């Protein structure tokens, strides 16, 4: 018979089995924790991928929308640019048509009304000469007075027609150039309105291209018309200068000014007259600026660069 093992040995075996069991449970627990962590990582990874996909899709949509908006904006800008180009071209055509109509009307006035008035003047003068021998003295005096009144009326009408023709298409402009035409127009404006005007031009001012001369003359006409109608000015200065960089025209007054206008090119809301002046200047490649402030008068400036005014 074998003797039973001592108590110490039995306790040691039990302890080993307990430790082994704990190790097994520890390994199982660690594996369970690892699997849980792995499952959580996979879930988080899938969630992250889903969020990235959502963000990527949203970003692609945003980029596509932005590209569409940029394209639409570029198209809108191109449309606005094209519209502005067409508008300027139309305005230029209207200005040219207006100028042609003015010239045609001035010719019509000269050829028809002017000649008829001249013929009427000659006829009345002949009648005035003949009545001395055709009528008794007591009747001749009365008829002579009426004929002289008629002659005076014909002469006033002839002068009015002449002024209208010069306004429509000044012959001086074609024959002698802008300097002479402006000098005449300033004097006529002073006589007609009573507003003092000082005119100055560079000595020996040259002839310019026909379209440039007509355009600058019309701008002066429009500017002085605005002065007479709106400025309540007592003095106006008109200057025509040739500089190293080109031709400069300036019309300034001491009137009430235009508070709504900002210095620089005319903007939306400007009066029709200012818009017409701007289009006229643009049609010859010139820059028009208007400086005005309430109580400080208004200055209209036009600059024509070299290369655009010289006669070819």
Image: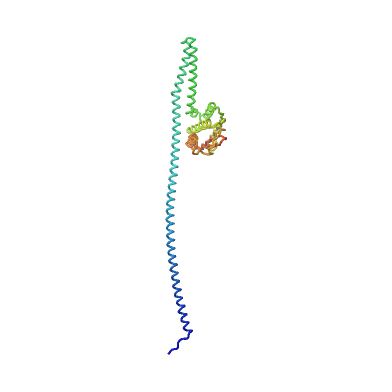
Image mark count:
0
Position of 44 relative to 303 (above/below): below
Q: Is residue 302 left or right of residue 2?
A: right
Q: Is residue 232 left or right of residue 59?
A: right
User: Which quadrant would residue 108 be assigned to in this image?
Assistant: top left
Q: How is the image coloured?
A: rainbow
The x, y position of residue 19, in whole percent, is 47, 77
The x, y position of residue 262, in whole percent, is 53, 39
Position of 128 relative to 22 (above/below): above
Q: Is residue 252 left or right of residue 64?
A: right
The x, y position of residue 35, in whole percent, is 43, 68
User: Which quadrant would residue 293 be assigned to in this image?
Assistant: top right
Foreground of the two, 261 or 288? 261
User: Which quadrant would residue 200 be assigned to in this image?
Assistant: top right
Which image quarter holds the N terminus? Answer: bottom left
Foreground of the two, 165 or 77? 77
The x, y position of residue 126, in whole percent, is 46, 15
């Amino acid at each position: 018979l074998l003797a039973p093992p001592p108590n110490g040995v039995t306790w040691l075996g039990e302890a080993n089995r307990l430790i082994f069991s704990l190790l097994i449970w520890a390994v199982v627990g660690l594996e369970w924790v690892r699997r849980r962590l792995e499952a959580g990582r996979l879930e988080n990874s899938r969630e992250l991928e889903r969020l990235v996909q959502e963000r990527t899709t949203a970003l692609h949509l945003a980029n596509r929308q932005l590209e569409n908006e940029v394209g639409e904006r570029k198209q809108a800008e191109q449309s606005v640019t094209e519209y502005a180009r067409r508008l300027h071209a139309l305005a230029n055509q209207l200005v040219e048509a207006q100028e042609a109509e003015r010239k045609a009307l001035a010719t019509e006035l000269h050829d028809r009304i002017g000649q008829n008035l001249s013929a009427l003047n000659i006829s009345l003068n002949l009648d005035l000469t003949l009545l001395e021998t055709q009528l008794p003295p007591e009747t001749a005096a009365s008829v002579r007075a009426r004929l002289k009144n008629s002659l005076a009326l014909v002469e006033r009408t002839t002068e009015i027609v002449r002024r209208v023709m010069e306004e429509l298409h000044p012959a001086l402009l074609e024959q002698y150039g802008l300097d002479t035409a402006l000098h005449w127009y300033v004097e006529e404006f002073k006589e007609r309105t009573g507003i003092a005007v000082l005119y100055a031009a560079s000595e020996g001012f040259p002839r310019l291209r026909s379209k440039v001369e007509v355009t600058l003359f019309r701008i002066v006409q429009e500017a002085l018309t605005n002065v007479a109608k709106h400025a309540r000015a007592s003095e106006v200065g008109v200057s025509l200068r040739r500089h190293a960089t080109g031709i400069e025209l300036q019309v300034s007054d001491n009137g009430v000014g235009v508070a709504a206008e900002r210095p620089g090119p005319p903007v939306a809301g400007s009066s029709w007259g200012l818009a017409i002046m701007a289009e006229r200047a643009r049609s010859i490649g010139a820059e028009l600026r208007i400086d005005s402030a309430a109580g400080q008068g208004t200055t209209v400036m036009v600059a024509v660069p070299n290369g655009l005014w010289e006669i070819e």
